Image (spheres, rainbow, N blue to C red):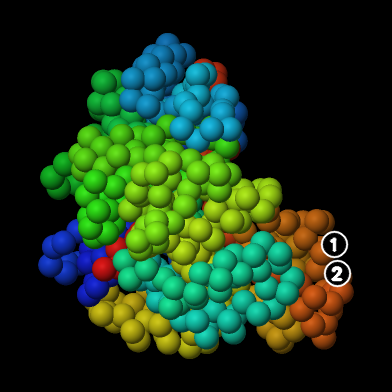
Amino acid sequence: AMASACCFGIQSRVSLFSSPRVCKSTNTPRVAPRVCGGGNRVGAALPRSMTSPNGRRLPRASSGDSSNNACAASGAPSLTDSEKQYLRDEAVSWAAQHGLLVATDGATVGAAMASNFTHAPISLLPTPFPKDVFATAIAVSPRFAELSDLVSRDHEFLVEQLTGVLETDDFTAALWDVYLQSGGQAGRNEIELGILRSDYMLDVPSGNPLQVEVNTVSTSFMALSTRVTQMHRHLVTHSKTLATHYAAENADETGDFFEAALPSNFALEKAAETLAAGHLAAGHQDAKLLMVCQPNEKNVFDQRLVAHLLWEKHGVRVTRATLAEMDAHAELSTDGDDLMYHNEKHSVVYFRAGYAPGDYPSDKEWRARLLIEKSTAVKSPSVAMQLAGCKKIQQALAGPGVLERFVARFENEQHRGVDTSTAMRSTFAGLYALDGEAGGVEAVADAIVEPQKFVLKPQREGGGNNLYGDDMVGVLKTFDPSAKPGQKGNLSQYILMQRIFPPTNKTLCLRAGEMVYLETLSELGVYGGDVRV
C-alpha cells in the first residue's frame, strides 16, 4: 500500500513543496510548507489508535484470510458479501470514469495512446497509518527537497562521494559523463525544477517513520494516488455502513472528522502547478513542455492526467516523446540552444523515464540525454539532481556532521519548533558504505549472521533491484574491505541498509476486476519539489 501526502512552500530563491504519495509554490511570498493532503496508491487512512515498544498501538495482520476479521484488521467495518460486491462494482465504475487506469498494451511511439486498459490495482478501502507518524513525515519532507537541491550543486561533495561508485557502476558513470560533457555546474540552467518523492515506512521496533529513499527522477503515481483518495471518499460517503463506521471511529475529532481520518490529496494539482511554474519562469509562453516517457508505457494515465491538467488549468501544451525519438527529431536552435523537437520549441523537459539502465538500450538514448542537458530548457530533473538521488549520497548524508553541513545553508534551521537536522535524522535508518570503513565492515559481518535485519541496495531508482536473504549474503561474502574500486571484492556500488519492519494489514484489494484479501505493507511517499529561479 502506498500512502500519499502533499506540502508546499517557498524558501528564498527555491520554492518547495511536499506531499504525502504526492507537490510547488509559485510567485508568492515565503510561506511555511503546508499539508496538502494524504491519500494512498492502494489506500491509507489515519487511525485513531494503532502499540509498538514505545507505546504506540499499531495495526496487526489478521489471522484469518478472507473473513470479516480481515476488514477489521485494516480499520474497515465487517462487510457482507453483497456489500463487498457493491464496493467492487462502484470502484470499477468510478475508476473508469475518472482515469484511475493502467494500460494493458503500449506503443514504441511516445505520443501514441494505448487502446486497451483496465482499472489500476487498488485497495477498495483505506489502510490504517498512525497520524503522528504521518505528520512527522510531512513536516520534514520539504527539507529533503531543499537538501537534494543543495547536494546537487556541491560538485566537490558529489565527486568525493561518488568516486568509488563511478568506477564500479556503469550506469552512474554514464550519467556522470553527461554531467561533465554538459558543463558540470557551470552548464546548468539558472532555472531548474524538481518533483521529488521521499518514501517512508513505519518501523514497528522503533515506532518511527524511517526513510526508504529519496526519488529525484521520474517520480510517479501523483495522479493515480490523488484519484485513489477521491475514490475512497466516494465509496465511504456513498455507503451508509462505511460512513457510519468512520464517523464513529473519529467521533471526538473537531471539525471535519472525515478530513481528519482521510486527508485530501492534491498531488496531481500541485505537480501540474510546479511544472507550469517552471514553464512560466522560462519565459517562452508559446513553447511546449516535453514529457520524456518510456516506449510501451503502461502507466500512461498517471502521466496523461498531469498533461491534461497542465493544458486545462495552466494553458501549457505537452509533447510526449521517448529518448530514441528525441535523438531522431530533436536539435538545439542556432540562436541560443533552445530545445527544438519537430521544429517546435520546448521550454521544460519533464522526465518520466531515464532513471534506469534499461531506458538507455543504445547510444541514441544517451545522445538525447546529453542534448537535453546542453539545451536551455528547464529540466525536471537535471542530471546533477538525478545524481544527488544516488543511494551512496543517501548513505553519506547519514554520516556524522554531513547532514548538518547542508542544513546550515537552509534559510530556516528550525522547522515547526524542532531543529531541522534533528527532525530529519529521526527518519534515517542505519546506512553503511561498503568502501572499507570500519562501520561498513562490522555491518557486513552482522548482515551475514543475521541477514533478515538488512537489505543490500544498488545505485538504482525504480525498485526491484534490492537484494535480500541468501542473495544478499552471497554477494556480501565476496566483500573485501581492502579492495579498491573496480577490483574483485569491492562493493562500493552498493549500500547496506537496516531493514525496516512495517506493520501488516489484511486489505481487500481489487485487481483486474477480482477482489482478494492480501497481506499488505504501507509505504508513505511524500512528494516534494523546488523551482529555482
Left or right of 76: which side holds 256? Answer: left
Left or right of 333: which side holds 247? Answer: left
Whole-percent x, y for residue 328 in the image: 55, 44
Task: Tell which of 452 and 47 is nearer to you.
Answer: 452
Residue at figure coordinates x 56%, y 24% from the top left? 104
Left or right of 54: which side holds 245? Answer: left
How would you rate the neighbour count of disc 1 (Cα within 10 Å): few for under 14, some for 14-19, many for 20 or more? few
Q: Is residue 475 above or below residue 68?
A: below
Q: Please indicate, yes or no, whether residue 211 appears anywhere in the rendered image.
A: no
Left or right of 31: which side holds 303? Answer: right
Q: Which mark is residue 474?
A: 1
Task: Tell which of 361 and 480 is nearer to you.
Answer: 361
Q: Please indicate, yes or no, whether residue 327 appears anywhere in the rendered image.
A: yes
**In 3D space, how far apart are the residues under numbered discs 2 and 1 (Cα atoms)?**
5 Å
Q: Is residue 528 above or below residue 12?
A: above
Q: Quadrant of the C terminus?
A: bottom left
Q: Is residue 49 above or below residue 335?
A: above
Task: Report the residue marked by disc 2.
Answer: 477
Whole-percent x, y for residue 288 in the image: 32, 45
Residue type at mark 1? Gly
Residue at figure coordinates x 35%, y 35% from the top left? 305
Whole-percent x, y for residue 31 in the image: 17, 67
Residue at figure coordinates x 71%, y 87% from the top left? 438
Residue extending furthest top? Answer: 82
Contact between marks 2 and 1 (CB within 8 A): the answer is yes
Q: Which mark is residue 523?
A: none
Residue type at mark 2? Lys
Quadrant for residue 450, please give it.
bottom right
